Amino acid sequence: MDEFRKEYLGSGITAFVSQAHSFGTDAVLLADFAAPSKKAVCCDLGSGCGIIPLLWCKKETGRITAVEIQPLGAKQIETAIEYNNLFERLSAVNADLKELKGVVPFGCFDVVTMNPPYKASGAGIESQSGADKIARHETMCTLTDICETAKKLLNFGGRLCMCIRPERLAELICEMHSAGIEPKRMKLVSKCPGKSPWLVLVEGRRGGKTGMTVEPELFVHNANGGYSDEMKKIYGDYLLENRGENT
C-alpha cells in the first residue's frame, strides 16, 4: 500500500497525499472558484485525496461529503478527517458516483464540484497505472454521468462547479444543458500572459435562467515567472508554508 505523506494546507488543515492520489493547481483553482457560503451543504465528486473539501474546511462551511470510488483515496480522506478532527464537518464515501441512490441524499446539496477526467475514453495515450487512468481518462464515468448525478444531488438553484480543458468546453456545456443545469459563470485560466488558456472553470445552476458571465482571465504566473498576485491570494497561507512567497 502507498505510504501517505502529510501536506499542510495552512489554517490548521493537513491533507494526506500518496503517489496515486495527490493534487495539482487545477484542484486548488476549482476549490476557490466554487467558494461555498458559510452554511452551504457541499458534495465533491471524484474527490481523490479530498483536497477540495479540505481546502474548504480552512473556512466555515456547512456539511461536506467527499465521494471517491478508489478505496485508497477514500482512506486518505478518512485519515485527514481523523487527523484534523473534522468528523462534524466532512465525511468520506467510497462509492461510484453513478450509484449514489440510498448512499448520499438527493436534492439537498447547495454546491457540487468535480475535477473530472480530462480525456474521453480512447483519446490519447492512456496512463499505465490504474489510479492515473481513472483520474485522467473516462474509464469510470463520463461528463454525462457527472452532470446527471449532479442534477440528482443539487437542490433547485444549486451550483455545479467543474474545471475542464478548453477543447472539451462545448461538450461540457451541452451535457449541462441536457441535465437541466444552466451554465452561468466561466473563467479562463492561462499559465502566464501571452499563453493560450489551458483550463476553464465553469459554474452551472440547476434550473437556472439563461445568461452567462465570463470573468476576467486568471494567470497562474506573471511575466517574471513568479506567481501572479491573484494566484498568491488563492494559495494563501498554503503558498507561504510550502512553496515560498515568490515561487
Image: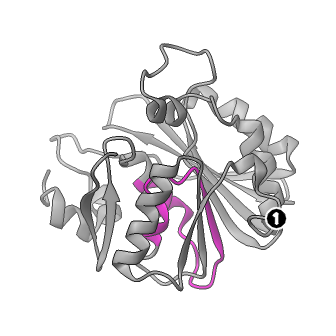
Residue 144 percent across, percent down from the top left: 77, 37
Q: Is 6 above or below relative to 138?
A: below
Query: Residue drawn 82% across and 64% down?
Result: 102
Q: Which residue is mark 1?
A: 102
Residue 247 percent across, percent down from the top left: 14, 50
Snapshot colouring: one colour
Query: Residue drawn 26% across and 52% down?
Result: 228
Q: Is 81 left, or right, of 88 in this rendering?
A: left
Give 106 or 192, whichever is nearer the viewer: 106
Q: Determine which quarter of the picture holds residue 154.
A: bottom right
Give 153 or 173, whichever is nearer the viewer: 153
Residue 214 percent across, percent down from the top left: 60, 49
Q: Is 94 above or below relative to 123?
A: below
Residue 48 belongs to the span the image colors magenta:
yes
Q: How many marks?
A: 1
Q: The magenta stretch spans which residues? A: 28-56
Residue 129 percent across, percent down from the top left: 42, 27
